[in-house]
């Protein structure tokens, strides 16, 4: 559980933001992301984690964005490692994360999102965004702006999280390596008494890059679905969760024409259970049930969550 000393009651000191971008071999995309970052309406620290790029990324950042903090990895360490590393060196109170193929559509996104951390139990904000190359649909946007809506998770390319809470919960589990680390963190966030708030800021646009390893996404997607259940699901729910996740993953593979790859990913998940057997730390049944409810409904009003689930909520206004 997160400690209550993380909650700064009656603290009127403005929260300071840090934008974190982890990148690898997407120099041109990164340039657009950084242009939108430096144009934000309030002073914002920017950290770029270059995960062993070979396309001149580091040189571009140094020349065109000299105020950004650039961390270069000589060997690829992965996205999860990079985001954890950035959290340890950031000077801001709130960590904003976007992918290198995303951008803030207006200079107001950071300032608008900071305003939504208006209660101690808001651990993260899911920022509204559009996957431009897929659909015009706006995702992660609160149904209304006059009430606090909470959800089960955020997308890595469009979120902000309290740094102190992130570090207190030991950040993302690097054993996920690729995909699924956000959902895992968010269920632990809820277990610790914090919520993920649905945002109402101006949009982030995500231009999903064609430079994506679909094989790795398939394998680790299925692997980490199984792994998530082992690490977090209470014992009374675990057998049915593992069975259901395995079946759904394989059926999805048949539907998209890649059943063997999905099956391989599922088997990787069960192998990960054996490898990380001692890391299992299931959440409470109440947390799990509410997490599943949030997942099913997409978002609900804060007032509809059990009061005992949210640290510091009692006696405060949503």
Image (tube, rainbow, N blue to C red):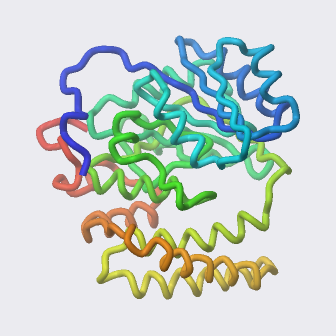
Q: State which quadrant residue 83 falls in.
A: top right
Residue shown at the point (81%, 33%) measured from the top left = 29
The answer to whether 111 is drawn above or below residue 25 in the figure is: above
Residue shown at the point (80%, 54%) measured from the top left = 212
Looking at the image, residue 157 sits to the left or right of residue 65; the answer is: left
Query: Which quadrant: the C terminus?
Result: top left
Residue shown at the point (46%, 59%) measured from the top left = 184
Where does residue 80 sit, x and y in percent of width and height? 58, 49
Residue lying farthest to the front in this orientation: 74
204 and 299: which one is in front? 204
The answer to whether 116 is drawn above or below residue 310 in the figure is: above
Where does residue 44 sit, x and y in percent of width and height? 54, 17
The answer to whether 179 is drawn above or below residue 41 in the figure is: below
Report the number of discs.
0
Looking at the image, residue 8 sits to the left or right of residue 201; the answer is: left
The answer to whether 22 is drawn above or below residue 286 in the figure is: above
Where does residue 94 sit, x and y in percent of width and height? 44, 29
Where does residue 226 sit, x and y in percent of width and height? 52, 75
Residue lying farthest to the left in this orientation: 315
Residue shown at the point (74%, 64%) measured from the top left = 216
């Amino acid at each position: 559980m997160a400690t209550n000393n993380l909650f700064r009651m009656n603290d009127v000191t403005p929260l300071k933001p840090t934008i974190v971008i982890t990148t690898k071999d997407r120099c041109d995309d990164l340039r657009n992301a950084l242009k939108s970052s430096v144009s934000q309406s309030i002073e914002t620290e920017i950290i770029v984690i270059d995960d062993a790029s070979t396309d001149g990324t580091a040189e571009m950042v140094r020349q065109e964005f000299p105020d950004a903090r650039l961390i270069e990895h000589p060997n690829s360490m992965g996205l999860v490692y990079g985001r954890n590393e950035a959290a340890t060196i950031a000077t801001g109170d709130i960590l904003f994360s976007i992918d290198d193929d995303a951008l803030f559509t207006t200079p107001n996104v950071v300032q608008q999102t900071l305003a939504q951390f208006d209660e101690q139990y808001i651990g993260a904000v899911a920022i509204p965004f559009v996957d431009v190359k897929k659909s015009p649909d706006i995702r992660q946007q609160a149904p209304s702006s006059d009430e606090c809506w909470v959800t089960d998770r955020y997308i890595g390319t469009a979120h902000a999280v309290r740094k102190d809470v992130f570090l207190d919960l030991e950040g993302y589990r690097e054993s996920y390596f690729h995909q699924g680390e956000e959902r895992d963190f968010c269920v632990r966030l809820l277990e610790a008494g914090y919520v993920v708030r649905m945002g109402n800021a101006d949009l982030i646009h995500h231009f999903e890059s064609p430079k994506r390893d679909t094989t790795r996404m398939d394998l680790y997607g299925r692997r980490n679905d199984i792994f998530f259940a082992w690490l977090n699901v209470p014992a009374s729910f675990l057998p049915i969760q593992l069975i259901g996740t395995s079946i759904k993953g394989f059926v999805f593979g048949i539907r998209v024409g890649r059943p063997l790859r999905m099956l391989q990913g599922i088997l990787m998940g069960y192998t990960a259970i054996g490898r990380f057997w001692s890391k299992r730390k299931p959440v409470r049944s109440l947390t799990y049930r509410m997490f599943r409810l949030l997942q099913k409904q997409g978002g609900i009003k804060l007032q509809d969550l059990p009061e005992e689930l949210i640290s510091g909520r009692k006696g405060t206004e949503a």
